[in-house]
Amino acid sequence: MSHSLPAMHEPAPQLSRGPFRGLAPFDTTDVDALFFFGRGHEQDVLIANLISFPLTVLYGPSGVGKSSLLRAGVAHRLLEIANGDVRRQGRPEF
């Protein structure tokens, strides 16, 4: 009986995207922002720092959610603020 391995060029099977992402980071989409929660304080601190200082550094061990915090938390919220500014005054404040 012979067993053959899949060819290297075959794509990996696609897994369903649920709220439990494993090591895949969240993105700036509205859906990802809905599933990303529990880091509101850190998000507020980062946004305040980004508005106040030209350089803000976020560091931590691999896999703790830095990219998700920045994408689904900070970037998503800043985009919401900018879009609201555009609707009200025709341009983003920051």
Image (cartoon, helix red, strand yellow):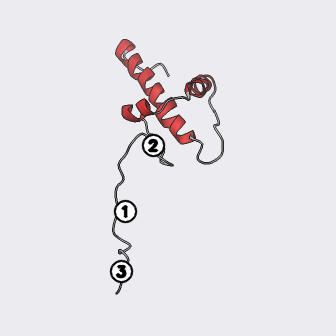
Where residue 39 sits, quadrant-wise, is top right
The residue carrying mark 3 is 4
Q: Is residue 14 above or below residue 28?
A: below
Where residue 50 sits, quadrant-wise, is top right
- The one of 16 and 42 positioned closer to us in this rendering: 16
Q: Circles 1 and 3: CB distance less than 8 Å?
A: no
Between the C-alphas of marks 1 and 2, the distance is 19 Å
Q: Quadrant of the N terminus?
A: bottom left
Position of residue 22 measured from the top left corner of the image (x, y, whole percent)? 49, 48
Q: Tag 3: Cα neighbours inside 10 Å, few (<14), some, or many (≥20)?
A: few
Between the C-alphas of marks 3 and 2, the distance is 32 Å
The first of marks 1 and 3 along the sequence is: 3
What secondary structure is found at the residue carrying circle 2? loop
Is residue 59 rendered to the left or right of residue 68? right
- The one of 61 and 4 positioned closer to us in this rendering: 4
Q: Is residue 47 above or below residue 14?
A: above
Res 39 label: none
